[in-house]
Image (cartoon, coloured by chain):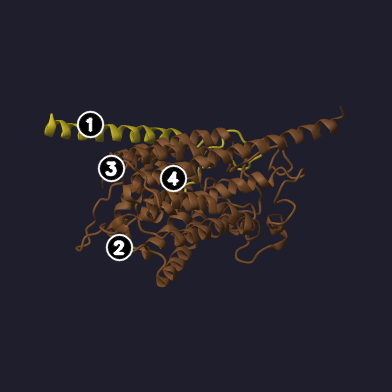
């Protein structure tokens, strides 16, 4: 075997290994959706359980075809802002050679799959916030806009090596504190403002009632499944080495082209999960919030998971664990009924995650000299963009739906239970009565 | 704001986590230890309150 033949064989093996890696990372990411399904059904009262579950399953199902129709194209083409690069987007045109089985392309399918599952995550984040009163058709439309349009724009701008926030500001968001979590959290906030609270959430004097879901064990187990799924999610955030598409032959890289390792992700993901749980325990001693704390922790540390000192990742996550429940309480005081704390866990902790990188992680060089290093101002400006890019579409589109009368279920349906619309019941033997 | 990068370039880099090789890593290690101790104190106080009321 000549050296050239040996090199070709190594490259071919690496391409197959890359395909295997992303294929199984995508499969693990499905657990995020399974976890959100359990989380939301458990957080619902019995009479709303199946409606919450149906909504979540449909979000998953609608994300896949719509991401195929236009989501992937948006990611590839819109990295410069609102004006598309049609040449770059050609690889995402749904009838192109790359968008189906192709023996010369082992990459597009698995990358498309991983990004589609990121999109499913965004829709799931919103879906928990709006349970027990949003109408199904409105939810599906909002989920598609969030997961197959808005998140793709945020990813193209801040999670793409050519993205204008990356090349202009040195924006760093390895694990998507901004591009997934802030976008989803603030999109959900925009929707919640127009959707209004569940019947019975607030009293006439503005004070809030606690509405407990019917199965905290189901919710807690679902959250642990989400944590498992995050290993697929964060694993899919790194670029496999040694293929023609890779940044380097001998080392993993983040999506911006900076070197990293799976060991780095393992150290910091586990530290962040633990820091968030312990932070939330310190703040609330509530099992619901402790498991949400795992998310608070991961989201708070996510933007810098590729570079944190593990001890500092723990501290950043711990602070996120304090921040999440506090922010949820503040939102409630403003009359926002976020049934699962999605705005605080994903939106507010996402802000903290981006700013923490700016505060503690300055000075890291970019992969090339013409891209700025990480700075606080780069992260701060990126945070503002993510906040607006998430909030404005969520608010405007849900406002239009509200004006059309298609956003919110009537008080009567809410009091009877949203499950009347799904023609089934969660517990036929009426184990629970509320 | 805090320049914590231990590297100036990626070529030849080894330990690249922030504060690698500096006192900063030791500092954050001890902050982490404190973060682990605080909830234990919180839990002791909460348990004492429950014991006093129901024990």
Q: Is residue A132 visible?
A: yes
Residue A220: where, in percent of width, then height?
Answer: 37, 39
- State the residue at coordinates (37%, 63%): A408
Whether marks 3 and 2 lie on the same chain: yes
Asked whether the beta carbons under mark 3 and mark 4 sit within 8 Å of each other, the answer is no
- State the residue at coordinates (59%, 54%): A65
Residue A69: where, in percent of width, then height?
Answer: 63, 58
Q: What residue would you read off at disc 2?
A: A411
Mark count? 4
- State the residue at coordinates (21%, 35%): B46
In this structure image, what is the colour of chain B? yellow
Give the alpha-carbon distance from disc 3 to disc 1, as whole Å.
34 Å
Q: What residue would you read off at disc 3?
A: A432
Give the alpha-carbon distance from disc 3 to disc 4, as whole Å.
22 Å
Q: Numbered disc 3: what chain?
A: A
Q: Numbered disc 1: what chain?
A: B
Instruction: Please tell me which residue lies in front, B46 or A42.
Output: A42
Quadrant of image for the N terminus of chain A? top right
Asked whether the beta carbons under mark 2 and mark 1 sit within 8 Å of each other, the answer is no
Label of residue A9 in the image:
none
Q: What element carries label 1?
A: helix
- State the residue at coordinates (44%, 45%): A36
- Circle nearer the N terminus (4, 2): 4
Q: From the viewer's perspective, is B45 left or right of A415?
A: left
- Circle nearer the N terminus (3, 2): 2
Q: What residue would you read off at disc 4?
A: A36
Q: From the viewer's perspective, is A314 left or right of A101?
A: left
Q: What element carries label 3?
A: loop
Q: Is mark 2 on a helix, strand or loop?
A: helix
């Amino acid at each position: 075997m000549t050296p050239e033949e040996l090199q070709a064989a190594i490259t071919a093996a690496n391409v197959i290994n890359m395909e295997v890696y992303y294929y199984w990372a995508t499969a693990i990411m499905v657990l995020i959706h399974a976890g959100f399904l359990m989380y939301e059904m458990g957080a619902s009262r019995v009479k709303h359980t199946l409606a919450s579950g149906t909504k979540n399953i449909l979000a998953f199902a609608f994300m896949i075809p719509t991401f195929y129709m236009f989501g992937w194209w948006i990611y590839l083409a819109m990295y410069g802002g609102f004006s598309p690069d049609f040449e770059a987007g050609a690889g995402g045109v749904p009838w192109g050679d790359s968008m189906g089985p192709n023996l010369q392309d082992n990459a597009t399918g698995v990358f498309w799959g991983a990004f589609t599952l990121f999109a499913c995550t965004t829709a799931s984040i919103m879906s928990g916030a709006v349970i027990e009163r949003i109408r199904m058709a409105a939810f599906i439309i909002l989920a598609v806009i969030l997961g197959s349009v808005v998140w793709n724009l945020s990813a193209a701008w801040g999670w793409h090596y050519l993205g204008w926030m990356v090349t202009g500001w040195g924006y760093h968001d390895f694990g998507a504190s901004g591009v997934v979590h802030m976008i989803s959290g603030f999109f959900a906030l925009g929707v919640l403002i127009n959707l209004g609270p569940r019947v019975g959430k607030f009293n006439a004097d503005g004070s809030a009632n606690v509405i407990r879901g019917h199965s905290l064990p189901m919710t807690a187990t679902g959250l642990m499944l989400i944590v498992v799924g995050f290993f697929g999610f964060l694993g899919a955030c790194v670029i496999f080495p040694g293929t023609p598409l890779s940044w380097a032959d001998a080392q993993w890289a983040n999506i911006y082209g900076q070197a990293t390792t799976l060991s780095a992700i393992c150290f910091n993901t586990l530290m962040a999960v633990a820091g968030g749980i312990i932070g939330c325990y310190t703040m609330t001693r509530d099992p619901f919030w402790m498991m949400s704390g795992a998310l608070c922790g991961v989201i708070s540390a996510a933007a810098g998971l590729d570079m944190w000192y593990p001890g500092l990742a723990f501290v950043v996550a711990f602070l996120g664990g304090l921040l999440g429940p506090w922010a949820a309480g503040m939102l409630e005081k403003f009359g926002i009924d976020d049934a699962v704390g999605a705005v605080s866990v994903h939106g507010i902790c996402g802000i903290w995650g981006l700013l923490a990188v700016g505060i503690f992680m300055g000075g890291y060089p970019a992969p090339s000299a013409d891209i700025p290093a990480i700075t606080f101002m780069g992260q701060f400006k990126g945070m503002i963009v993510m906040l607006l890019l998430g909030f404005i579409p969520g608010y405007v589109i849900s406002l239009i739906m509200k004006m059309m009368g298609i956003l919110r279920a009537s008080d009567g349906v809410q009091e009877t239970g949203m499950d009347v619309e799904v023609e089934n019941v969660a517990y036929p033997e009426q184990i629970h009565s509320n | 704001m805090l320049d914590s990068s231990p590297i100036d370039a990626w070529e030849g880099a080894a330990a690249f986590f922030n504060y690698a090789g500096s006192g900063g890593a030791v500092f954050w290690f001890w902050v982490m230890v404190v973060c682990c101790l605080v909830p234990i104190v919180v839990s002791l106080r909460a348990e004492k309150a429950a014991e006093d009321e129901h024990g």
